[in-house]
Structures are given as C-alpha cells and as structure tokens.
Image (cartoon, helix red, strand yellow):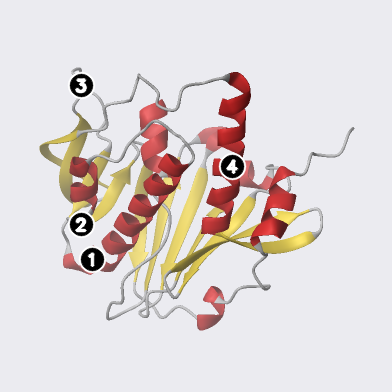
Amino acid sequence: MIVRTLVALGLAVSACPALADTTAVYSIGDGDFAMTMTVEIADNGDVRSQMSGPIVEKMPKRVAIYSITRGGEDFMINETPDGVSVFRMSDAMTVMAEGWAKAREQTGAPEDEADVPDLALVARGEQTVNGRSGTAYYLRSEKKKTEPVLVISRDPALAQLGRTMARQFGRSMVGMQSMGVSAKPDDSMLKALNEGAPLLFGGMARLQTVRHDPVSAARFVLPAEPKTLDEVRTLMTRKPPAR
C-alpha cells in the first residue's frame, strides 16, 4: 500500500506544448474516501490540477486547493488562516526538506534507509480501464496476482496527457528524494510513463473522461503573487492554534 501511495503521489501536473487543450478527469478511491482529480492542460503547456470531493472539503486549512504550472514552473495554491496564498513548489519542497533534515538530526536517524522499496515494474499483458485498453504494469516485487500499478495507453489522442503526467511524476520523485524519502525513482517506471498516458496509476486513480475543448486562459492565472521562500517557511512551520 505504501509503495502504491508513493506512485500515486508521484504524479502531479505539467506539460509540453501540443496542438489542442486537454481536460482529463481521474477518480481516486471510493465511498467516504472518494476523490476526483481534474487535470486541465493548455496548448502552451500551462496546467491546472485540482482535487475535489467530500473528503477534500473536510481537510484542514493550509492544505493545497489546486496547483498550476506556468512557464514550466509549478505553483501550489493554498488556503491558509490568512487567506489564499501561492507557493512555488520548489520553495515548499525546500522547506519540507529542511524539516526532514532537522527531524533526522534530532532523532539520530541515518542518512540512507536500508529498506528501500523495490519500485521496478514489469509489463504483463493488456487491461481495459473504462473502455480504454493499455499495457498493464505490475511491481516486480509482488509475486501474487494483484491489481496493476500502471496501465499505459499509447492512444495519440492522449499524448498530451501522457507527457503531463510523466513530467509531474519525475519532478515529484526528485523532490521526495530531496526530502529524504527512501523510495527512489526506477527507470522502468519512468520509461513506462514516457510511453503513453496512464489509464490507471498508483493502483487507485482511474481515468474517467477526456475531452479536448478549449480551456479558458483564466484557469491558469495565479490568484496572488507567489510568497517568498521566507514567507513560505513561516507559513509551513507555523504551529496550529491551541484548541
């Protein structure tokens, strides 16, 4: 479960230029934990990704509402006690890495974890997800019959979405490594993501719909000026108010 969650978390939003806009909707989980992720991609490479659903609405303040990629730079838009704020993803990663390093220093934890999960994937046939078929990839370390971690479609109509998800995964895994997370990117996983668009990823997020209607440029406008690194550090390390 931990490995599958890391794979899912590794998938964020960003894209290369293409010929048409794309809006893709993924469903994640079910029941009380059901969420929807909507990924909007402009033909100039700008991207907006937003989670929705009852469980998202119950999350506390200071949790990211959505993310935007503009000019190749990733931003998180958060709701904080002081209102809506914009963080550069790179600054947020820096602050989290600082916190991780401080925690390890205080606990005396080693720099490298000995037990590194095996994230290598192997292709095992085809699988259909909501009417679309693709190559199914499973964790090499899982010997028994399980759900695939990834199902990759090579449909040209999904190429823009595929480039977006592959770039996001690569950036996120590098950021997680900088924070000291022991899971390491595996060439087989990155290669699979670079071969097409995920119909299923992390064993939990399933592609529901894709359309290529124009997406308004207003969807990619930052709602405020990005915070400085010092401001991000202050907001992210602030202790919650006592109850």
Percent across and percent down for residue 191 are 18, 49
Q: What element carries label 3?
A: loop
Q: Is mark 4 on a helix, strand or loop?
A: helix
Report the Cα–Cα distance between label 3 and label 1.
29 Å
Residue on which the image places disc 3 = 145
Query: In the current view of this chain or complex, which residue is farthest to the right?
Result: 243
Choose mark 4 or mark 3, whichever is in front. Answer: 4
Percent across and percent down for residue 55 are 62, 41
Q: What residue type is labelled 3?
A: Lys
The residue carrying pointer 4 sits among few (fewer than 14), some (14 to 19) or many (20 or more) residues within 10 Å by Cα, namely some
Residue on which the image places disc 1 = 159
Report the Cα–Cα distance between label 2 and label 1.
6 Å
- Image height of 57 relative to 142, above or below: below
Residue on which the image places disc 2 = 196
Report the Cα–Cα distance between label 4 and label 2.
35 Å
Q: What residue type is labelled 2?
A: Gly
Choose mark 2 or mark 3, whichever is in front. Answer: 2
Residue on which the image places disc 4 = 98
Would you say 162 lies left or right of 68 here? Answer: left
Image point (28%, 50%), residue name: 199
Q: Which of 155 and 232 is in front in this view?
A: 232
The residue carrying pointer 1 sits among few (fewer than 14), some (14 to 19) or many (20 or more) residues within 10 Å by Cα, namely some
- Image height of 126 relative to 106, above or below: below
